[in-house]
Amino acid sequence: MADASRESKLSAAFVAVADTLTADYDVVELLHTLVTECTEILGVQAGGLLLAEPGSGLHLVASTSESVELVELMQLSAGTGPCLDSFRTGRAIDVPDIEAAAASWPEFASIALQHGFLSLHATPMRLRSEVIGTMNLFRTRLGAFPHRDADVAQALADVATIGIVHERIASQSNLVVAQLQHALDSRILIEQAKGVLAQSADLSMDDAFTALRSYARSRNLQLRAVASGVVDRTIDAAAIAH
């Protein structure tokens, strides 16, 4: 019966995480859902989640208690700890006895023990070779994290990671599309300006383009801005042609 209840809760957790992956989902809400569901299903006392933002390192983005938040922030401040090692290596790290591991991570061990945490399991958030963060589950009892529970934590983390990576790719794609559209719009505008110059100053299209570029460079202006000025008549075509 207990196994059936656990499986039901696990299925509900996957649904809860997946439900946050809507077209306009909130990443923070996704991560809070992930860490909350894991702590409840796996019977751990607290959880925290560190996420890497491109170019700015790891940040604490979700936690289930003030105590674990302080422990996570201490790790980030010290630049060392099992959660950071999990992120750097892309592997799960289990710490059955935090006090016994104090030699490896003294700052982390000290503050974790102060807040009553005796063991930890750090799960990397990864998609193939890309690691974007870690989910860290803290317990107030000693002992290794059960392999079955570790698999559950990794599976839920993987689902969330896929959503986050997909969102980042989509954002990058949208940026590329916007940049491409800007470039196409600029080209159309420049072609229009060349036509205005060619007609008003009796220039070839090549000479009109050369005149536009020379005018823009001599005044430290964007070529698009000069072209726009020629088209809307705010820049005198004769001034450019001579």
Image (cartoon, grey):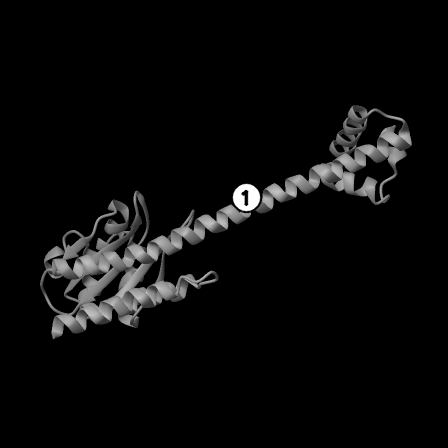
Check the image and report above or below for 84 versus 61: above
The quadrant in which residue 223 appears is top right
The number of numbered badges drawn on the structure is: 1
Residue 14: x and y in percent read 29, 64
Residue 42: x and y in percent read 19, 67
Q: Is residue 103 left or right of residue 177?
A: left
The quadrant in which residue 113 appears is bottom left
- The quadrant of the rendering that contains the C terminus is top right
Residue 179: x and y in percent read 59, 43
Q: Residues within 10 Å of mark 1 (few under 14, many from 20)?
A: few
**Residue type, mark 1 in image:** Val
Let me know if residue 221 appears in the view: no
- Secondary structure, mark 1, is helix
Closer-to-camera residue (44/198)? 198
The quadrant in which residue 109 appears is bottom left
Q: Residue at the location (29% across, 72% down)?
A: 65
Closer-to-camera residue (50/155)? 155
Q: Is residue 69 left or right of residue 175?
A: left
Q: Residue at the location (20% across, 65% down)?
A: 138
Residue 159: x and y in percent read 31, 57
Q: Is residue 76 left or right of residue 139?
A: right
Check the image and report above or below for 207 versus 226: above
- The quadrant of the rendering that contains the N terminus is bottom left
Closer-to-camera residue (142/27)? 27
Q: What residue sits right under mark 1 in the picture?
A: 176
Let me know if residue 147 appears in the view: yes
Check the image and report above or below for 57 versus 99: above
